[in-house]
Amino acid sequence: MFNKRYLKLYTEGEYSTVWKELVSLGSATRNSYVYQEAILVCQELMHRAKSNCDAIVARLKSIEYQFETSYTKPRTEPDSSTLKHLADFEQSVGLLPLSLRKWYEIVGGICLMGSWFNWNTYLDDSIQVRRSHLGIPTHILYVDPLVVSSFEDTLMEQGYDIEDDMTLYKPTYLSIAPDYYHKVGVSGGGTINFLVPDHSIDALVKDEKREQFFVDHLKTAFQWGGFPGFADVPEELRPTEMLNYLREGLLPI
C-alpha cells in the first residue's frame, strides 16, 4: 500500500534513517510500491539541497567571493527542456540513479570554484601576484569546492551534443565535476564520475577522494558550507567565521 510513510518520517526529521533504509533496498526498489515513496522522499531531499545551494551562493556573493566562471556559472537552473533530455537519455542509455535524476530535475548545477581575498582556492596568476604584493599567503588550499554540473553541461563537457542520439555513443559514465585538484586549477587528476546505467536509489561517486554515495557527498559538502576539503586543512588555516556564516541554518538532508 502506498501510504507515504517514508515521506512522513523524513519530513519529521528522520533524514538519515529514512534515506539509508531506502538505499539499502537496492535496485529492487524500482519494482515495488516503495519506489513511489522513494521518489517523494528524493524530491523533498533535493528541494532542500536546492535551498542550501542557493543560500551558499548568495552568501558567497555577499562577501565578494570571486567565482571561477570559466568552467560554468555558480548556479545553473534546469530549464523546460531538461526533462525531455533526461527522458531521451534514459531511453537510449538506461536509468540514472534516482538521486542524480532528481538533482538534475530540481537543482540543476552548482560550481563553487573560486577564491576569497584571504584564502586561496584557485590557481590564477593575477590573483597570485596581487596576493604576493599584499603579503597574503599564496599557497593553494585544496578545499574541494562543491561542483555538480547540470545535465546539459555534463553531456557537453564529455563532447556530446545535447540533441545527439545517445544510442550512437552508449556512454558508460557521466562526469559530473572536476576532481579535487582540477577544482583549484591544478592539473594531474581526473573527473568525478557516476557509472551508467544504474537502477539504484543512490550511487557511489567514483574517482573522488572521499568515495561516498551522492547524497552523503552533498551532506558532507553542506556541513562545511560547500567546501568539504576544509576537513583536511589545519584548523589554524580555516576561516572559521566564514564557514560558520556559510553553513548557518542550512537544511538537513
Image: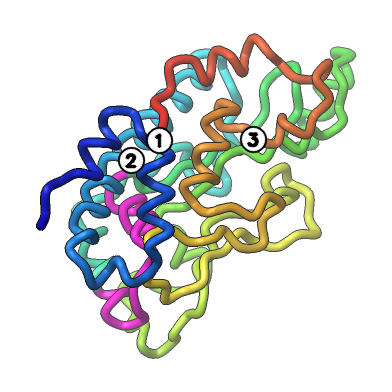
Magenta span main SS = helix
User: Residue 48 is drawn in which quadrant?
Assistant: top left
Q: How far across and how far down the image is residue 132, in percent? A: 88, 21
Q: Residue at x 56, y 26 (%)?
A: 225
| Location of residue 189 with respect to 182 vertically, above or below | below
Mark 3 against mark 2, which lies toward the viewer?
2
Label 2 belongs to which residue? 45
N-terminal label among 3 and 2: 2
Q: How far across and how far down the image is residue 93, in percent? A: 36, 81
- Which image quadrant: the C terminus? top left
The reply to whether discs 1 and 2 touch (Cβ–Cβ < 8 Å) is: yes
Secondary structure under badge 1?
Answer: loop
Label 1 belongs to which residue? 253
User: Residue 168 is drawn in which quadrant?
Assistant: bottom left
* Viewer-nearest residue: 4 or 165: 4
Label 3 belongs to which residue? 228
Q: How far across and how far down the image is residue 172, in percent? A: 50, 79
User: Residue 127 is drawn in which quadrant?
Assistant: top right
* Viewer-nearest residue: 95 or 151: 95
